[in-house]
């Protein structure tokens, strides 16, 4: 069963629902986003009753906004508590603290940020909302200058959100140790037997040590081969701790030089936000992540690698970091962007006056041509902005 909510659903996910006749809950949000009466719509009441009668409800959400529906309608199941274990970053750190006994973290209320003396803390550290999304309010602090910058942003006025309180809450933050290593994003799920099924592993590139943006994520055959088994071993422990079955998740970790995996956060009931990483698997590996989760399938990676191109596949979030106000911008020149990237597979334009990004693109890059990804990672995008 699928729950759909704002802010975005891709044509690919809609087509997946239609072609597989997946049940979709008939909420007013879903109906306003999808104008297609031929889908397998199920009323909210019927959906609730069906899911309550399942020992491990099988639900996929395209948006964390849908978590509110689960909290309101499925209280009698384990699902709300399991979701909160991951959605609340403080609860998550408590869940895994025996795995990482030397990892320091603490709670802080937003009103206390302005008076906190960081001389009492070990540098570097990260501060972020305990309930957050989309890197909103996330800061890496390496020195007092970083802290003063963070203090200026971290207030209620700046952190007003389009997301419901269950998704983004600026009242409580977590301060935690900075995790060294290369960052990766993982789409996976626990099947009906509680086994880990990895659907994608993407390298999250950064432009600097203080960059916390979501600009470039890349996957490839070599990345999957290198990390899949150790990711499975790591997630198996998490699944056993939380007793997870029929549970999709989007995981962010860092892997250090010794190959040790340390989790940043786990996002429950979905893959990458805004239909990004979930859709990308189709263009990269030629399988449908949503279908695999809902039908309890596993990728046959050996077969995939036999026919897969030796390329790098990326999703690029064109966030507006130009310093130019949206009100001053006429449009984003995607035709010009095409000239700077080897092969754009998909362009998804967003309303940059409503959202903090011009769009999302999926790309294919030949090995040896990774410089184009570095260039777009470091760009302020002003060359593509038209006033």
Image (tube, grey):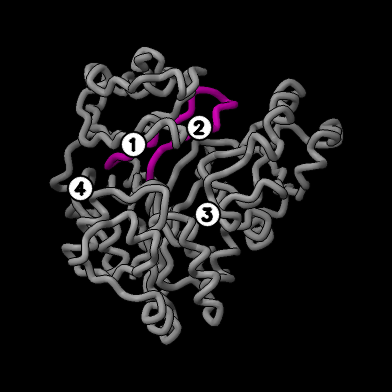
| Picture coordinates of residue 262, whole percent (x, y) | 57, 48
Q: CA distance from mark 4 to mark 3?
A: 27 Å
Split into 4 quadrants, where in the image is the N terminus? Answer: bottom left
Residue drawn at the location 34% of the way across and 16% of the way down? 384
Q: CA distance from mark 1 to mark 4?
A: 20 Å
Name the N-terminal-most of marks 1 and 4: 4
Front: mark 1 or 4:
1
Between 242 and 307, the one lying in front of the other is 242
Q: Are marks 2 and 4 in contact (CB under 8 Å)?
A: no
Between 226 and 117, the one lying in front of the other is 117
| Picture coordinates of residue 172, whole percent (x, y) | 72, 49
Q: Are marks 1 and 3 in contact (CB under 8 Å)?
A: no
| Crowd band around label 3 with a 10 angstrom C-alpha radius: few (<14), some (14–19), many (20+) | many
Q: Which residue is mark 3?
A: 266
Residue drawn at the location 58% of the way across and 58% of the way down? 166
In the displayed structure, 289 sits above or below 38; it is above
Q: Which residue is mark 2?
A: 213
Q: What secondary structure is marked by label 4?
A: helix
Between 38 and 208, the one lying in front of the other is 38
In the displayed structure, 116 sits above or below 67; it is above
The span picked out in magenta is 201-222
Name the N-terminal-most of marks 1 and 2: 2
Residue drawn at the location 21% of the way across and 60% of the way down? 36
Front: mark 3 or 2:
2
Q: Which residue is mark 4?
A: 305
Q: Which residue is mark 1?
A: 315
Q: Is residue 295 left or right of residue 103?
A: left
Q: CA distance from mark 1 to mark 3?
A: 19 Å
Evaluate whether residue 98 shows in this view.
no
Residue drawn at the location 41% of the way across and 67% of the way down? 190
Whether residue 29 appears in magenta in the rendering, the answer is no
């Amino acid at each position: 069963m699928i729950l759909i909510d704002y802010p975005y659903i891709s044509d690919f996910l809609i087509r997946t629902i239609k072609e597989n006749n997946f049940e979709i809950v008939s909420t007013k949000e879903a109906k306003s986003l999808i104008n297609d009466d031929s889908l397998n719509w199920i009323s909210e009441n019927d959906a609730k009753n069906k899911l309550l009668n399942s020992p491990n409800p099988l639900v996929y959400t395209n948006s964390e906004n849908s978590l509110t529906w689960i909290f309101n309608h499925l209280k009698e199941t384990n699902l709300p508590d399991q979701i909160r274990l991951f959605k609340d970053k403080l609860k998550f750190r408590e869940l895994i603290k025996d795995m990482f006994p030397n990892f320091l973290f603490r709670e802080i209320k937003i009103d206390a940020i302005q008076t906190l003396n960081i001389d009492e803390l070990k540098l570097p550290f990260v501060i972020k909302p305990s309930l957050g999304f989309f890197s909103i309010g996330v800061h890496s602090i390496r020195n007092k200058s970083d802290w003063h910058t963070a203090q200026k942003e971290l207030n209620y006025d700046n952190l007003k959100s389009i997301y419901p309180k269950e998704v983004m809450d600026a009242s409580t933050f977590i301060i935690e140790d900075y995790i060294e290593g290369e960052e990766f994003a993982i789409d996976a799920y626990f099947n009906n037997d509680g086994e880990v099924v990895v659907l994608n592993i993407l390298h999250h590139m950064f432009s600097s040590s203080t960059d916390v943006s979501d600009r470039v994520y890349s996957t490839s055959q070599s990345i999957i081969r290198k990390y899949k088994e150790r990711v499975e071993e790591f997630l198996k422990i998490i699944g056993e701790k939380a007793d997870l079955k029929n549970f999709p998740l989007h995981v962010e970790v860092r892997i250090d030089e010794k190959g040790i995996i340390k989790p940043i956060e786990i996002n429950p009931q979905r893959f990458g936000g805004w239909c990004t990483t979930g859709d990308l698997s189709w263009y990269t590996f030629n399988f449908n992540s949503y279908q695999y989760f809902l039908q309890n399938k596993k990728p046959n990676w050996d077969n995939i690698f036999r026919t897969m191109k030796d390329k790098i596949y990326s999703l690029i979030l064109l966030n507006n970091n130009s310093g130019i106000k949206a009100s001053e911008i006429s449009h984003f020149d995607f035709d010009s962007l095409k000239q700077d990237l080897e092969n754009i597979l998909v362009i998804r334009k967003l309303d940059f006056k409503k959202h903090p990004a011009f769009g999302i693109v999926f790309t294919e890059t030949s090995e040896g041509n990774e410089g184009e990804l570095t260039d777009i990672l470091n760009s302020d995008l002003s060359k593509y902005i038209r006033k």
